[in-house]
Image (cartoon, rainbow, N blue to C red):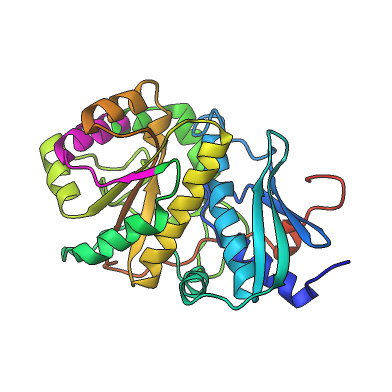
Amino acid sequence: MTVLTTEQLGVLARAVSRAPSVHNSQPWQLLVRGTEVDLLERRDVHLRRHDPSDRDRVLSCGAALTNLELAVRALGRDCHVGLRGDGAVVATVTIGRRRATSTRAYLLYQAIGRRRSHRHRFFHSRVPTTVQHALVAAGETSGVHIVRPARLDKLAQLLGFAARVLRDDRGYQRELAVWTAHTHGWDAAGDGIADDALGPEPLPFAGIVRPDTPIPDDAVLADRLAGENWLVFCTDGDNRADQLAAGAALERTWLTAASKALAGSVITQPLHLTGFRARLVSELALPGVPQAIFRYGYPAVPAAPSPRLPLGELFAPPGGTR
């Protein structure tokens, strides 16, 4: 027996659809089974050069799981989230009895439609310390640690090195070009990164490195990093449950930022380079395994929403993924 109407299922689908994902690949589907909704990992989405171990794909599913839970609660329902093993089902959300939505949960749900990947400059005004603390508190949970890096000079050295490697990696650049849609975010339907979301700006504003991305020297990059706000999301381990938890925590922080008129973007591609994460742990004295780097601030220009696949493609037929 279903417990939600078609319109309510649409609310869930739209919330999941708007979650951030690696290269906007949207690697998830939903399977509705009465009072249970399975979040499925689409394993046909594989970025061989950017995400060779599929870690970013799992992080993306963790972000979608946060949105799914918030949408259920926004409908006035209690829910229980159960993580699954290594199969296609990453988590099952069990819909419970009617329950009033908390103000905090509803504010985060409302922020889902406003969240954007902002790969441009921020205003130079600093984010108030109280707001920075709120973003950290929103994401921290058991096994997930959020660090505001103190050694931005070291971070600049590592990001600059990684950017030069990725800029010259022809295989990586070919894959990125395939996932860059030559469309405009406000009107596009589908997946991939809208070309106008990237722009010609240098690091760190570019976010994603392309063949023509200007890369400043380490000292200039460090100064630019100091003018922004940075968080590193770490986990105690590096299995699928850890990666899901990191993705879920990242989305809670990002939605909290959006609810406070902030914008942000995620950097993960350097973390896939051999030895990069170990160097990051050593240089920044991180308390765990780094899963994502998040930059945020007050946007200098508005960011258009990324294209999205039709909602009908989000629902998996009984028996598995597409």
The majority secondary structure of the magenta stretch comes to helix
- Which is more toward the observer, 60 or 174? 60
Residue 195 can be seen, yes or no: yes
Q: Residue 266 vs residue 306: left or right?
A: left
Residue 241, position in %: x, y? 57, 38
- Which is more toward the observer, 147 or 185? 147
Any magenta on residue 159?
A: yes
Q: Quadrant of residue 290?
A: top left
Asked if residue 290 is positioned above or below residue 137 in the image, the reply reads: above
Q: Residue 31 vs residue 163: left or right?
A: right
- Which is more toward the observer, 61 or 227? 61
State the extent of the magenta-drawn residues as a range: 145-162
Residue 273, position in %: x, y? 40, 26
Q: Residue 18 vs residue 298: left or right?
A: right
- Which is more toward the observer, 254 or 175? 254
Q: Residue at x 22, y 36 (%)?
A: 155
Asked if residue 57 is positioned above or below residue 29 in the image, the reply reads: above
Residue 52, position in %: x, y? 54, 28
- Number of numbered labels in the structure image: 0
